Image (tube, rainbow, N blue to C red):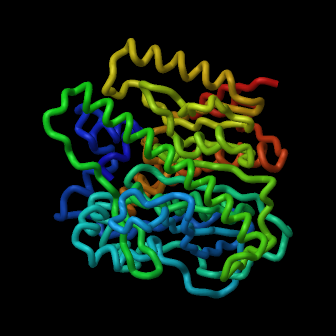
């Protein structure tokens, strides 16, 4: 989890060696994870979902025959994705509780993949492999009987991560009546396990020797742009397949006819925030869009596409307060970025918000399970992590309810009562 304090472009800069960024440092919760001696033995637990529904999960392999697989040795291969649907289930029904990370044992058996996942999950990796850390989701559970149709959320994970690192959020959304399609972005995810036993790890562009700092930076920007485009195309493709699934054109279609595809949102964290927002710019079928700390300083808050398309749906930029952190760019660049960010937000539709959260211990990884897992059951750190998870989830839920369900929330409308959040509303009416 070494990059969990960093934003998308900062992570790309580090991974490509374009610059050295001073923010690459452990979070306050990490010191206990660095040493094997004296480490707490408590097993982290994902919080119970707070909604009225149980949580079911079903997985699909979907191949986009319109897009070739540019990294495969097989010239006939096409873009191949695993998509995991988390959905409202009948509460209290018995069933096998799902693994925290399905396929972890297979990943652990592959030395190269194991190394990547050990870096991502640190000392929690053995607990994930053994099944000691679990999900509340029940595989192939019976879908809740009512309502007849559920709003849908597509989730894009961060660079080099996995959608299962957002289990607390995914379960909570499902328990409140949302079907969440969590997309594993092949070659962008740390590793993806397919039903036929294949394991595909993250792709890393080979180093090109002799590049100048400017050339390395331009190479990084090109790679970042390609990754964003791929992630956005993945989300739009998955929305197409969800349409097919809703019509019953899928095996094991427990959700046939149960998806309300007139109420669809895209949400992404870090790099996934860029993927989600670009997909929303390009595809008006998304009726709401959320970027979780997915801005791209010093360039822009949201990606822009060559066609000049812009959001037709309300947007929430939900950010951690990074004030005082050292960055890989200077004040002049930051001033230009803030001006660009304000311009972009000002062009967003009515109902859009920029919300900056400032709470003790809240970092870039707090939008995922990162801080909770890193706490390793230590009471004070666990309490902080749970508080911050609840804080991020409350704003996500409020925005989705307002955008997809025509609800109202004091979190977004009465902004004086929430000392841990600075809320600014945008939107052309």
Outermost residue on the front side: it is 75
Between 228 and 97, the residue placed more toward the observer is 228
Query: Residue at the spot x=64%, y=75% of the render?
Result: 56
Q: Is residue 287 left or right of residue 391?
A: right
Residue 30 point in image, percent of width and height: 30, 51
Query: Residue at the spot x=32%, y=58% of the render?
Result: 120
Between 64 and 185, the residue placed more toward the observer is 64
Query: Residue at the spot x=37%, y=65% of the render?
Result: 191
Residue 24 lies, with reference to residue 374, above or below; the image says above
Outermost residue on the left side: it is 210
Outermost residue on the top side: it is 332
Query: Residue at the spot x=54%, y=35% of the render?
Result: 357
Residue 236 lies, with reference to residue 293, above or below; the image says below
User: Is residue 419 something one can see in this rendering?
Assistant: no
Of the 4 image quadrants, the one containing the C terminus is top right
Between 259 and 331, the residue placed more toward the observer is 259
User: Is residue 366 something one can see in this rendering?
Assistant: yes
Q: Is residue 247 left or right of residue 375?
A: right
Number of callouts in the render? 0
Q: In which quadrant of the rendered view does residue 63 lie?
A: bottom right
Q: In which quadrant of the rendered view does residue 174 lie?
A: bottom right
Residue 143 point in image, percent of width and height: 74, 77
Q: Is residue 212 left or right of residue 239?
A: left
Residue 135 lies, with reference to residue 358, above or below; the image says below
Residue 262 point in image, percent of width and height: 81, 54
Between 96 and 220, the residue placed more toward the observer is 220
Residue 35 point in image, percent of width and height: 19, 59
């Amino acid at each position: 989890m070494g990059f969990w304090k960093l934003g998308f472009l900062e992570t790309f800069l580090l991974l490509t060696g374009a610059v050295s960024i001073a923010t690459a440092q452990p979070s306050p919760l990490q010191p206990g994870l660095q040493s094997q001696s004296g480490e707490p033995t408590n097993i982290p637990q994902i919080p119970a979902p707070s909604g009225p529904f149980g949580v079911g999960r079903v997985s699909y392999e979907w191949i986009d025959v319109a897009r070739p697989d540019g990294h495969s040795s097989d010239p006939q291969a096409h873009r191949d994705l695993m998509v995991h649907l988390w959905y409202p289930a009948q509460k209290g029904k018995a069933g096998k509780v799902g693994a925290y990370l399905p396929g972890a044992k297979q990943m652990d058996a592959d030395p190269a993949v194991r190394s990547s996942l050990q870096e991502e999950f640190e000392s929690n990796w053995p607990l994930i492999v053994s099944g000691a850390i679990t999900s509340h989701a029940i595989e192939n559970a019976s879908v809740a009987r009512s309502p007849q149709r559920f709003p849908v959320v597509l989730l894009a994970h961060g660079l080099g991560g996995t959608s299962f690192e957002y289990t607390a959020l995914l379960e909570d959304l499902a328990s409140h009546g949302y079907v969440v399609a969590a997309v594993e972005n092949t070659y962008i995810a740390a590793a993806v396990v397919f039903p036929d036993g294949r394991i595909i790890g993250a792709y890393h562009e080979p180093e090109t020797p002799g590049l100048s700092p400017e050339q390395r930076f331009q190479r990084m920007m090109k790679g970042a742009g390609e990754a964003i485009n791929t992630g956005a195309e993945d989300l739009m493709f998955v929305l197409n397949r969800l349409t097919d699934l809703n019509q019953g054109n899928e095996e094991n279609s427990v959700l046939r006819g149960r998806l309300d595809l007139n109420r669809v949102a895209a949400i992404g964290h870090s790099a996934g925030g860029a993927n989600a927002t670009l997909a929303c710019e390009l595809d008006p079928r998304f009726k709401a869009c959320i970027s979780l700390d997915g801005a791209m300083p010093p360039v822009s808050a949201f990606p822009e596409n060559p066609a000049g398309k812009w959001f037709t749906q309300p947007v929430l930029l939900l950010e951690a307060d990074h004030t005082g952190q050292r960055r890989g760019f200077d004040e002049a660049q930051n001033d230009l970025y803030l001006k660009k960010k304000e311009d972009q937000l000002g062009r967003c539709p009515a109902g859009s918000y920029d919300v900056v959260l400032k709470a003790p211990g809240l970092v870039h990884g707090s939008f995922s399970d990162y801080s909770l897992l890193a706490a390793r059951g230590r009471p004070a750190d666990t309490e902080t992590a749970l508080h911050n998870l609840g804080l991020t989830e409350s704003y996500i839920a409020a925005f989705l309810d307002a955008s997809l369900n025509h609800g109202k929330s004091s979190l977004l409308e009465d902004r004086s009562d929430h000392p841990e959040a600075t809320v600014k509303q945008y939107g052309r009416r």
